[in-house]
Image: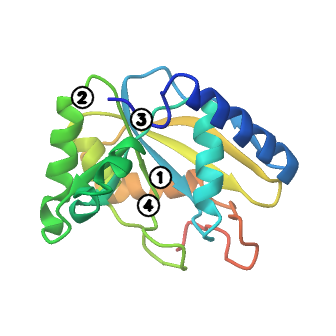
Amino acid sequence: MKTIFNTPLLSPILRGLSNALMKLSGWQVGGSLPNLPKYVLIGAPHTSNWDFLLFLGIIFHLKADVRYMGKAELFNNPFGWFFYYCGGVPVDRKNPAGLVEQMVAACNKADKFILTIAPEGTRHYVKEWKTGFHRIAKGAGIPIVLAKVDGKNKTVHVGEIFHPTEDQDADMQAIKGFFAGMMGVNPKKKYITLTE
């Protein structure tokens, strides 16, 4: 599937531009993504509208070809092609119980599939993370890869791998533990702590 992340000529230009903007803004990426065909990539904390631009910078820097979930209506004509081109996978949000199954099916159909998700589900403060990313990874039999936003040091740490187990509650606590002390782009938001 041709996307903005793997188009010859265009992707290298966008990668060079995003790398320059990252450097000018003082942000850097630590680590690298694993050489695996399929996984769920989660990024946190999600604290600002600027996170989307940071996300694009990171993805282009890492030369990753990623996917994201989007409501099915976005993929209709006349502009649906654009959302597909940006790596979107349409899902029926009117059936929340089926989102996991839809993404597992999309993953199973693809030879390569990197799904990006913000586990908080919103840039606003939440006490509990959504568990969809864990259920998708478990259902598809793929690992979870972590991208930790260290706003204090303007670094995004990527590459740690977590293999989901049958104990979702314990897994969620363990995953949040990896993000403990991380603060996102917006310094006014709380650090992630194990008690949240």
Decide which of 47, 74 is in the foreground and name it. 74
**Which residue is identified by label 3?**
3
- Residue at (31, 58) in percent of width and height: 70
- Residue at disc 2, secondary structure: loop
Which tag, 4 or 1, sits closer to the chain's start? 4
Which tag, 3 or 4, sits closer to the chain's start? 3
Query: Marks 1 and 3, Cα distance to the nearest angstrom?
Result: 33 Å
Which tag, 2 or 4, sits closer to the chain's start? 2
- Estimate how packed mark 1 is, as few (under 14), some (14 to 19) or many (20 or more) residues with alpha carbons within 10 Å: some
Q: Are marks 2 and 4 in contact (CB under 8 Å)?
A: no
**Which residue is identified by label 4?**
119
Above or below: residue 2 compared with residue 186? above
Decide which of 157, 85 is in the foreground and name it. 85
Q: Is residue 106 visible?
A: yes
Query: Marks 3 and 4, Cα distance to the nearest angstrom?
Result: 24 Å
**Which residue is identified by label 2?**
110
- Residue at (79, 48) in percent of width and height: 27
Q: Quadrant of residue 128?
A: bottom left
Query: Marks 2 and 1, Cα distance to the nearest angstrom?
Result: 29 Å
**Which residue is identified by label 1?**
174
Q: Quadrant of residue 52?
A: bottom right
- Residue at disc 4, secondary structure: loop
